[in-house]
Image (cartoon, grey):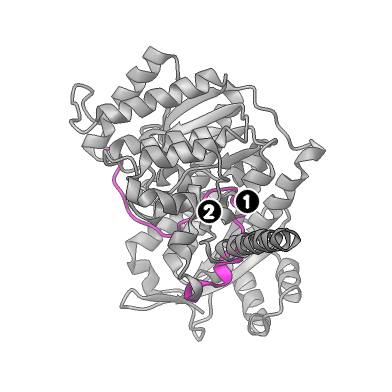
Amino acid sequence: MERKVRELISVVVFMLLLVFVLLKVSDLLERKNSRNKYAMFYENVDKVDVLFFGPSVPLYGICPAELWDDFGIAAYNNANESERLATTYWVIKNSLDYCRPGLVVVDMTALAWGAEKTDGTLKDHNFLDSLPLSANKVRMVMDLFPEKERAEYIWNFILYHSRWPELGKDDDEINCRMGGETRIGIKYNSNPRIGDPKESRNDLSDEKIIYLDKIAELCKEENINLLFTFLPYSAHQGDIVLREFVKKYCQDNQIDYLDMLDKNIVNYKMDYMDEIHLNPAGAKKVTRYIGKYIVDHYDIENRHRDVKYAVWNDNLQKYMEYKKQLLAEEKNIYNYISLLEDGDYGIVYQVKKDSQLYEDEKIVFLLDDVKRENMYDVTAKMVNQYLSDMENEEQKEKRDLYLEVLQSGCIPEDVGSDILFFVIDKKKGKIVDIASFTFASTYQNKRQ
């Protein structure tokens, strides 16, 4: 009898060790996209006052770190790439298992996407991978995915068990953007084509409306303020008429609605990296607009002086460093000028006389737009301070050139650069980047 007991104990211990090892290996092999995005959310669920949901439009268009900086709003961005409305409902429901915000904001651009419940790619793991196992997680998987695919969303080791070659440094990068994402680039877009309200869409399925109803009912049951939005994007005629449906739906169901498509918030020629997604300059403008709207319409506290929210201030510092890093690493002049649209920066720039840069209408437009809003005075003391703080010897060797350009107001003819930028943090009055670019007749450009 004693021998059987020992054998039983050995088996139990072995099984426990096996489960422990499998869980550790599963954590190691899992794609960290989800964990990196939601780590701060799960660590601070008792402090989040506003939650944003939806597909990639709000994912790239709303920056909670900027909301915190400008308004003291403790927000998190739980939007996900290519997310369908059915998935959004379940993301909201599972998020509310952990968090009780004062306001839920849901962007309605998902109504323009396909009728299917999910994206059908790895992007469907973006929320689920880091979501702890619960009854609602199981219900979400059962509702959204076909039977043969469900197991990998409950235990993703089934999907990631062969991921060893892909393990790398990106697995350790925690998102300092509080769930939001950044896309850098510039695409000239046309303004939205505001459609005839009498037009209708034939792909607004009953199933989409069912999940719209579920979102509204859930927030009503939980006594949470709900705001439906349309963030600005260069929408097609067919997409635009959805705004009338949403407007009437909100009126009929006493839901707040904010349509930003025709409010002249963004510059459609500067603030997008493609037809749909805002670049950092556009995201900052939209975030500031919706932040002001929240402050004016909801009882959301300014948490700046609340010592319990020190983690938000710590994260803001990381975010500001992240923005400076984007500037320092950007090699494309169009993208670089776009980053300068950030209202936190003041700039001084000089262009070499007779430079071919002036032949590029796009760059001339971008520079004129930046110049109107962000010009700043730079002193030799600021340049010397910036260079003394740097470890880059190549930059230090250019000290005399920088000072000469500041004093003379032009770039010497024997210098290869076509344009030289001085970028200043307005709040600190310090230079955060100095960059020069060449501009060739082939319209190729590079940072020197």
Q: Residue furthest front?
A: 1
Magenta region, mostly helix, strand or loop?
loop
For numbered disc 2, what is the local secondary structure? Answer: helix
For numbered disc 1, what is the local secondary structure? Answer: helix
Q: Quadrant of residue 139?
A: top left
Percent coordinates x, y for residue 61 in the rendering: 47, 45
**Disc 1: which residue:** 39
Mark 2 vs mark 1, CA separation in Å: 8 Å
Percent coordinates x, y for residue 447 in the rendering: 49, 76
In the rendered structure, which amino acid carries the disc numbered 2? Ser
Pick the residue in front: 340 or 398. 340
Q: Is residue 360 magenta?
A: no
**Disc 2: which residue:** 34
Q: Is residue 107 left or right of residue 372?
A: left
Q: In this rendering, does residue 422 appear at all?
A: no
Percent coordinates x, y for residue 427 in the rendering: 71, 51
Residue at x-position 52% and y-position 58%? 33
Tell me the magenta residue range.
165-192
- Position of residue 398 relative to residue 136, above or below, is below
- Position of residue 387 relative to residue 56, above or below, is below
Q: Is residue 376 left or right of residue 436?
A: right
Residue neighbourhood size for the residue with mark 2, other residues' Cα within 10 Å, grouped as few (<14), some (14–19), many (≥20)? many
Which corner quadrant holds the N terminus?
bottom right
